[in-house]
Image (cartoon, rainbow, N blue to C red):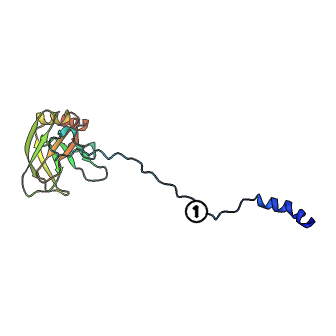
């Protein structure tokens, strides 16, 4: 019995230890979806009822340069050929508005500003890269309308994407260069 009594404290101590449970994998955290609002649809030139003054501007910037013929403002993405140019040719006494494009003959070019709408006949320039150009007299009010249009003006031609062009100071710089 002494042996039994000496084992009693050991047995009592052993009974206090919790049994080991089989190990379970850690629960995988539940990922809750994060609400992301849908992107706002961009207004497009073909959207009916949309005001063209709200259409997104064609990507690019204006750059102004002077050269032996007069001056030129180029619009487009840096590192690529210009999408649109406005050139003062002093010898010819004209301002040439050209957009990138190829055609076999004359193509109507419609220019819309916040104050006027004008359709001119664009001619292929025959250069590389190809452009379609219109000649505008330096004192023509269209040039001022383009330069002072409320934030932008557009150029539309059948078969070509509509250009939504910012009305920056480079337009008026070229215009004034040809008026001197």
Please name whichever residue, 135 or 37, is drawn nearer the observer in this view of the structure.
37
Mark 1 Cα within 10 Å, few/some/many (few <14, many 20+)?
Answer: few
Where residue 174 sits in the image (x, y, percent)?
21, 38
Please name whichever residue, 127 or 131, is drawn nearer the observer in this view of the structure.
131
Q: Residue at x 11, y 33 (%)?
A: 141
Q: Secondary structure under badge 1?
A: loop
Please name whichever residue, 97 or 88, is drawn nearer the observer in this view of the structure.
97
Where residue 116 sits in the image (x, y, percent)?
11, 35
Residue 101 placement: quadrant = bottom left
Q: Quadrant of the C terminus?
A: top left
Where residue 134 sits in the image (x, y, percent)?
11, 46
Tell me: 77 left or right of 149. Answer: right
Tell me: 13 left or right of 127. Answer: right
Where residue 171 sits in the image (x, y, percent)?
21, 38
Q: Quadrant of the N terminus?
A: bottom right
Q: Residue at x 63, y 64 (%)?
A: 23
Number of numbered discs visible in the structure rendering: 1
Q: Residue at x 58, y 62 (%)?
A: 25
Tell me: 155 left or right of 106. Answer: right
Q: Residue at x 72, y 59 (%)?
A: 18
Q: Is residue 94 visible?
A: no
Q: Is residue 36 shown above or below 151?
A: below
Q: Is residue 97 visible?
A: yes
Tell me: 40 left or right of 93. Answer: right
Residue located beneath label 1 in the image:
25
Residue 14 placement: quadrant = bottom right
């Amino acid at each position: 019995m002494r042996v039994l009594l000496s084992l009693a404290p050991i047995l009592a101590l052993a009974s206090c230890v919790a049994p080991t449970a089989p190990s379970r994998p850690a629960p995988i955290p539940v990922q809750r979806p994060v609400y992301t609002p849908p992107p706002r649809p961009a207004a497009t030139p073909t959207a009916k009822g949309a005001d063209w003054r709200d259409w997104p501007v064609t990507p690019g910037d204006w750059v102004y340069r002077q050269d032996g013929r007069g001056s030129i403002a180029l619009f487009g993405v840096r590192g690529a050929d210009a999408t649109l140019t406005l050139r003062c040719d002093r010898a010819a006494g004209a301002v040439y508005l050209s957009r990138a494009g190829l055609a076999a003959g004359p193509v109507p070019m419609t220019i819309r500003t916040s104050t006027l709408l004008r359709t001119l006949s664009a001619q292929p320039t025959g250069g590389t890269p190809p452009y379609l150009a219109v000649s505008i007299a330096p004192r023509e009010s269209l040039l001022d309308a383009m330069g002072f249009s409320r934030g932008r003006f557009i150029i539309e031609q059948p078969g070509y994407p509509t250009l939504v062009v910012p009305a920056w100071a480079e337009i008026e710089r070229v215009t004034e260069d040809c008026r001197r």
